[in-house]
Amino acid sequence: MLTIAKKTFHSRLLIGTALYPDPFTRLQAIKASGAEIVTVSIRRTSLKKSSSENLIADLKNYFILPNTAGCFTAKEAILTAQLAREALHTDWIKLEVIGDEKNLYPDSAELVKAALQLIKEGFTVLPYCNDDPVVCQKLADIGCAAIMPLASPIGSGMGIINRYTLERIREKISLPMIIDAGLGTASDVAIAMEMGMDGILLNTAIAQADHPVQMATAMRLACEAGRFAFLAGRIPFKKFATPSSPSQGVVR
Amino acid sequence: MSIDSFKDKVHIIGGGVIGLSVGWQLARVGIPTVIFDAKKQKASAIAAGMLAPHAECLIENCPLFKLSQDSLSLFPRFLKELQEDSGNLLQMHTCGSLLVGVDEDDARWLERIYLRSKEHGIKIDQLTGEEAREKEPLLTPRINHALWIQGEAYIDPSSLLDALKKAFLARGGEIVEEEIEQLPQNAIVVIAAGAWSARFGLPIRPLRGQIITLRANFSLNCMIRSPRVYLTPGPLQSIRVGATSEEVGFDLHATGEGIRSLLHDSWEIIPAIDQMSLLSIDVGLRPLTYDRFLHVGKDKAGVFHATGHGRSGILLSPYTAYKLKEEICTYYSMVKNKKLVKERLLKV
């Protein structure tokens, strides 16, 4: 069970809704992932009947987490969050403020600024942030509902490139910690969950796989496997072998 | 449909490449046909006209591969018949597709496409940067490897539309320039209104595409694609650079972001883009289905659908025209016979 801001979810996966080959595959993949939370980016669009409504209609059985993808300043992100609240009747927001177009790294200064303002306005803020223990601590201190550090750049599929910092963040922060970006395949998800993460957000790894629905299934299983392995407690690393069969009574 | 007031004419809603192709093929076999053309921006009129099912399939992992191949093989017959009826000689320019990338990430994109080609049994050649530049000398020296698909072609969509219109009228077809709000009653109806088919309740969504046309003193030798953009040669030494894919509803505006990315992404491959004059910026709405499969055939109410062609309307026009011609002819004679029999019995 994943609890964020007093709301409880059975699945620990969060799924993004972009980049799928078509809406049908998107819906099938989201179903296969078992996710309850799906994140959608907020764009200006005509209020007349249009395609964007289809997405929301498709997702009526899911908990919708709007995001501020594409925002480069605190101001844009705050406005986007306010529009999302009006349009989707939710005060939850996945806060993204991008500082670097090439790597899509968050702009930590703008992010904290936007988070402060939105929390003041009563939003439940889930910030997409760098894997920086200090920034994560700050976001936790000012009252974010979860922290969502990246594993590697968005859409890169590189997996966890700085295990050390993510471990330090996990040690320090008791808030829900969700790995937001950069995972490429099922083993990446399992590793993150084994490290004690509370959840995983995936988009490109599923949407751009050759077979998105199959990959979504793999991700669901990996997430569960990693979580169970974390709870079960792995054996320590050892330098030398320990026989697994009893040594008494060996026939010589 | 009430047989008594059955109108002899097939009513086609939409005068884009699909509506015209179907209409012309019907008129060609003597079925009276009227096309209602709302004079909206036709996606087919601004398309790049690529007849490139292999590249398309490999890049998009496309479910329409088989149909696209079939349709491409129908093109020579389609164009021959079109020449008979319109007098216009249309050419498929078989120039091949070159797939290129500029950095490490693009190299992996090419690698993935190459693997997919093996899976689909598509013949594709791996080229070095040098070999790629032999095919197209304008390519940036940054390109280190490329993929080559022989035999893919393009056609100029506006000449195609002109010829279709001419052929349709020459065969006695009728074009009415007005917008249809509701489906005509007591007639065989074909909805071929592209993205606007949605207004008749079809599950079709518009996918906006922005495309720019540049002109230089030279043209391209082949079609070129990167993960972000395509460039195709066009008539009169023009180059088409496209296209964005945006889900923004029925919005036909060009945007700064769209044009900026097309220019940047094409300049990245062909630096000479800088020196070309910008002829036009066009915006169209592709008709997208929910699962990327086509909406071509008769529905429960007896209405024919001819839409959902996404980014492949030009390529799929022969397939759509021949398939619907068969189906509509059969249906037309059936309804017409019923009417004749009924009228005859009434006279007795």
Image (cartoon, coloured by chain):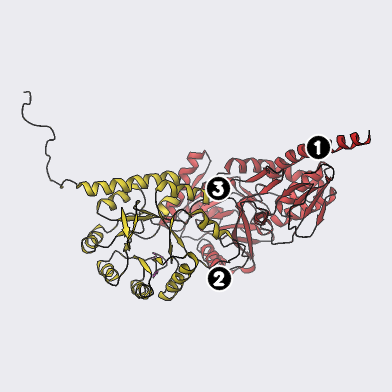
Disc 3, SS: loop
Q: Position of residue B215 (x, y in %)?
A: 64, 65
Q: CA distance from mark 3 to mark 1?
A: 33 Å
Q: Earlier in the sequence, mark 3 or mark 1?
A: 3
Query: Is A105 above or below relative to B342?
Result: below
Q: Amino acid at mark 1?
A: Ser
User: Is A244 within the magenta?
Assistant: no
Picture layout, residue B10 above or below residue A93: above
Q: What is the spatial separation of the Cα atoms under label 2 and label 3, in whole angstroms?
A: 30 Å
Q: CA distance from mark 2 to mark 1?
A: 52 Å
Q: Which amino acid lies under the numbered mark 3 shown in the image of this protein? A: Asp
The kind of residue on which mark 2 rests is Gly
Q: Are marks 3 and 1 on the same chain?
A: yes
Q: Colour of chain A?
A: yellow
The residue identified by callout 3 is B291
Neighbourhood count class around disc 3 (C-alpha, 10 Å): few under 14, some 14–19, many 20 upward: some
Query: Camera-side residue: A149 or A83?
Result: A83
The residue pinned by badge 2 equals: B256
